[in-house]
Structure formats: C-alpha cells, structure tokens
Image: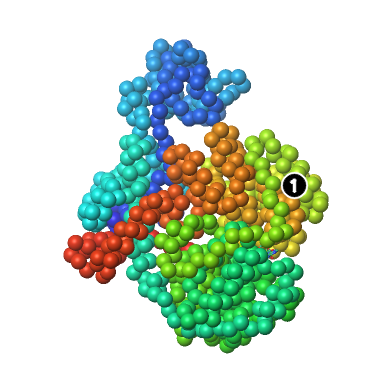
Amino acid sequence: MTRSTSIIELKGIGEKSSALFGKLNIFTVGDLLAHYPRDYETFALPVPIADAMPGDTCAIHGMVTGIPNAKKIRNLTILNVNVKDVSGAMQLTFFNMPFLKKTLRPGGYYVFRGLIQSRGASKIMEQPKIYGLDDYRKQCGQLMPKYALTKGLTNQAVQKAVKQALGLCATEEEYYPPSVIEQYDLCSAQEALENLHFPKTFDEMKAARKRLVFDEFFGFLLMLRQNKDMTEELSNDYPMHETSDTVRFLEQLPFPLTKAQKKVWGELKEDLEGSHCMNRLIQGDVGSGKTIVSVLALLMCAANGYQGALMAPTEVLAAQHFETVQGYIREYGLNLKPILLVGSMTAAQKRAAYTMIAAGEANLVIGTHAVIQDKVHFEKLALVVTDEQHRFGVRQREKLAEKGEGHPHVLVMSATPIPRTLAIILYGDLHISVIDELPANRLPIKNCVVNTSYRPKAYSFIEKQVREGHQAYVICPQVEEGEMEDLENVVEYAEKLRAALPADIRIAYLHGKMSAADKNRIMDAFSRHETDILVSTTVIEVGINVPNATVMMVENAERFGLAQLHQLRGRVGRGDAQSYCIFISTNEKKETMERLDILNHSNDGFQIAAQDLKLRGPGDLFGIRQSGDFSFRLGDVYTDANVLQGAAAAVDRLLAEDPGLSMPEHAGLKRHFATAGNSVDFRSI
Ligand code: ADP
Ligand code: MG
C-alpha cells in the first residue's frame, strides 16, 4: 500500500463511505493522512458532580442510585439513570439503549463522560459515554483527534480509517540531512504523522505539528527560491514616463493624498520609469487608500500606450474596483478604457471582452484570475496589479510574460499585516512599500465586546443608524457542512433579524455558497444603498468599500482570529461618519473576553496579531487562523513565524551548498519535494 492507493482498499470503506470521503477531497491514502485533525478532545480526570458546570464536557465518577427507569414514547426508549458522588447528584438520560438497564447495576460505580446541561435547577447529561474507572484512567490525558466531517461521516469512522492507513503505509525514509534534523529539533516524518493524528501527550502533538509545518514551509520556500522569476531582477521591458494624466487626476481629487500615499506613488513612478521591471508589494492597513495609488499606476501605464490589469480575489471585489474606476472616469474624465472580466460572465460576453483586449481597445482589464487565463491575449500588457492576494501576481510573472513581448511590471497590494522580516522570507526579492497612515478625515472606530444578551440593544442601535441614513454589516461564521449547529447561520440569522426589526428596513444576506453572480448582485445593491443591512459570512472580508456603512456587528467573534476581526472592522470607518464595531462573544470565559478586548486598545493590525498569539493558550493552536492569504494546510505565518524563519535559513543554506540539489545525499530530499502533494497547494491559483 502506498500513499497513492485509493482509500477504497482500506477495510471498512466501501463505495458509499468513499463517496463521503470524496466530499472532503479525500481520495487516496495520502489524502487521508493529510486530513489533519482540526482540534483534539482531551480526557481529563473525573470531576466532582458539584464542580461540573453546564456547557462543559467532562467526566464524573458516580454510583448508580436506584433502578434505572425506562419509558417508551412512540419508538423511542428513554432510560433515566440517577447517579451521585460525595459532592452531589445528577440525572443521566439514554435514548434507545434499553440494554443499559441490565448493565448499570444499582450501587455500581462508573465513569460517565459527556456534555453537562442544566434542566431547571438540576444538572443532566444526555447520552454520556460509559467507562469503568480503570479503563477511563488509561485514556486520561490522551488527545482524541477531531476531524472536519461531512454529513454521514462520523469522527470515529475517520479515526478508524486514519489509524489503518498509518499502520499500512510504508515508513518514509528521512529526507533532511542530519544537520537540519538536529539544528531544528525535528522528529521523523512518520512519527510526526502518527503523533499529529493520535498524540499521547500535548507535547507530542506540538512536536509533530512542528515537523509538518517545517515541511510545509521548507517545500514552499524551496520552490520559491528555485523559481528564477522570483529571484531575478529583470530589465524594464515597458519603460514609462509620467504624463499630465496623473498630475491632472491628482489635482482634481477632492482630497490630497496622505504623505504615505505620496511616498508610495513616488516609489511606483520610479520603478516604472527605471531600468528594472517592477516587483513591488504595497502593504497598508485596511482603509489606508491603496486602491487610488494603484489606479494612478494603471493610468500612467495607459497614458504610455500600454495595457494594465487589476486582479482581485473575488468577483465581488473585482466588480467593485470596476465601479470605482468607472466613477473616476465619469467624474474626472480619465483617459482609461476599462473592461470587466470575471468567471461568471457568459461565453459570449467573455469572447467580446477577449476581442477588445486583443485589439488593445481596452487598456485596463479588471477581474479575477480569469484575467490571466490562457484564452486572454493582450496587445501590450505592461502592468499587473493584484489586490489582497499575495502570491497571485508574483508567481505568475513567467506566465504573464507569455502574454506579451516582455515581463509586465507586477504590483501586489495587501492589508495583511506582516513584519518586514517575514515579508522578506515570503516574498523573495519583492520590494516593499508601506502606507502607514490613514487619511485624515477618519474618526477612530468605536468598539465594544459584549455577550449575547446585548443583542437587542445592538439591533436597536443598528436601527437608529439606518434611520440616520447609514448601513450596517452583520457577520456570522461560515456556512459549512458538518459545522457545529450552534453557530449562527447567515440565512437563519437574516430571518431572525427581519423579525426583530421594522419591516421597512431592507436586509440582504451573502455567503460563500452562493453563485458569483448572486454575490455580485447583492453586493452591488448594498453599495448602491438599495439594502440597509447586509448579513454575511467573511466573504466580504477583503477589500469591499462601502463608505456609508457605519456599523459592523460580528457574531461568534470568539471564533475569529483577531487579525481577521481587524480586517472585518476595516469595512467600516471608511467615510467621514463615526463608525462602530460590536463584537458579540458567545463564550464568556475571561480569557476569551480579554483576547477580544485587545481590539479595543489597538488599531495596528500587526500589533493585534502579535498580541493575540501571546495571549492564546496552546490549546488554541487549531481552529483559529490568523491569515487566510497563505494557503498552508497546517502552518500559519504568524503562529509559526519562528518555524518559518528556521525553514528559510535551512533552505538558503542547502541551496548555497548544492544549488541544483544534485549531491547524492540530497537525492531523497529532491525527490520528496518534487512529488506533487508534498509541496504546498496553492488553492488560490
Ligand atoms: P484599502 O487600502 O483598504 O484598499 P481603499 O483604497 O478602498 O482602502 O480606500 C478606502 C477609502 O478611502 C476610499 O473610499 C477612498 O476613496 C478613500 N481615500 C483614499 N485615499 C484617501 C485620502 N488621501 N483622503 C481621503 N480619503 C481617501
Ligand atoms: Mg482595498
């Protein structure tokens, strides 16, 4: 059995369950092994009944008092069992398990583990798992993996399949030189895989995770460093000079550029006029005004007789950029002929667009990655700007070059706060410009972190803002199959909100499972103020600009990384009206509230991410991701910054010693990282 063997070869997996695994993109044994747990459950020692709090999942060790009482309602058998320990008593309820009446002897002691719930003044557990004390003790402290699931597939089924796959797959030979293993204190790849899925201790899991994250970063950086595109300074195939177009545009704008914007615009001009092909990243916090700077560059490009492209990660954002540019053209008479190109357009619309692009009739193409697909031929593509999608443009330089006579200039814009040291590692030789200043008309956003009982107040606050002519966002966690049910769901939430607010307030909703065309329609309506409240998942996270929106309310805020919340918050406070953020936390634990409270004290995205890391317990390693920009499976550029640095140093040393990886001792390594699936999957590309 190898990693490419189909999972159907595993015992217990037939057509039906393999179809379910397929829904999770698990087809081979290798896919299964790479289906890492998203969290772990720990079995702690039993607690006294009096200390078991509703909402906690815990174990108690108690004596069965009296004879279990069974009743039948239609075809459901309900068995109630009373238990007590020295501290108190509680009732357990089992469904359709009549045989337990015989197993659970009155006077017998058992461990029961489950979710503690309150019923009136008393505590109950439904369907707890039952153990003998000794058996339970044996698994205490162990971490049980919890996997992402899909309807019909249980966690236990995944566990069983993974266990089998681990036992059957041949151990992989070590591919790193001993010096790397030693210096970065890495466990073996096999050990890592076993211990990530079934760790005996927390430390074991951490060590396993470290090795796998190191692998991920190493593979990624190795590819990056070997990619000449990323490392070579190319000459300027499309030199430009400044024309009156940009000067006039700047004069006509109703606001002056901030000092930081001016500086960055200066850097862009220098690149475009200079002797080398531009390869630049603009970092600027949300709302710092990156778009206008890129429009200036695109305008300069068009004025020099070339074509430019502006690419965004979503159609919604692309459509919005298109709107913005058209607005500028209407108001300031810019000499630009933009065209929109997105996946959801009809074949005929696309063909028409291709023709205009190929003929050079359109000098600015705005869209998603549809823009750089093979069918699109440019007449003279000289500048590619990508918004909020880090790797998108840069890694595609070679592909882009095929679209014209030379290498187009590349400009990447990002609001993801990342310190310089990491940026240098992740972006190779990309030059970095920073917009570290917000436009002066901005009032700081007012924030509050509250629990769910604050909802009615929040609703009436939103209503008031709507009455004043403003708009609001309400964010709920992702709609995803197999997700916990208690998370607020966008569709239901919108209904609830409609019921809670007067009928004339216009509410729309948006989520990732909708078609691109629907998303565009809804987003357009919101930005034209045809709706007042937009209930959405984080699909609106990046880039959207509706300056009239003044309230951002986030449900289940505890489920988000702070950096992500900061990005969300950036959707408001974009105009000159006072804006507000309401973070609702379902979990009132002190640590959670403290963590969210950081948002009240800082407005600096990177500062926030760093603080978040410091505060979070090691148990929070999973589940919360800070940055969605880099699609590593396991690694997180923030959380694992030091592993990233280690992997970068290791790659650099390796390539300095053996640039082609041709030395025999590096054969295993070369093979391992050349195999598809061992390097990072760039889902975004
Ligand atoms: P981001 O950097 O998050 O992409 P945008 O480019 O969308 O931000 O800009 C946010 C808003 O700020 C837009 O409405 C834009 O017109 C406005 N803006 C940009 N620069 C300035 C400025 N110098 N002064 C005032 N408003 C500005
Ligand atoms: Mg933006």
Q: Image quadrant for the N terminus?
A: bottom left
Judge from the rendering whether residue 101 lies leftward or rightward of residue 272; answer left or right. Answer: left
Judge from the rendering whether residue 477 lies leftward or rightward of residue 666; answer left or right. Answer: right
* Residue 31 screen position, x and y as percent: 36, 54
Quarter assignment of residue 229: bottom left
* Residue 400 screen position, x and y as percent: 47, 77
The front one of 579 and 122 is 579
Q: Amino acid at mark 1?
A: Ile
Q: Is residue 34 visible?
A: no
Mark 1 neighbour class, 10 Å CA radius: few under 14, some 14 to 19, many 20 or more? many
Judge from the rendering whether residue 627 lies leftward or rightward of residue 533; answer left or right. Answer: left
Tell me the SS state at disc 1. helix
For ligand 1, give the image quadrant: bottom right
Residue that appears at 35% across and 21% down: 133
In this picture, is 564 found above or below 344?
above
Residue underneath mark 1: 462
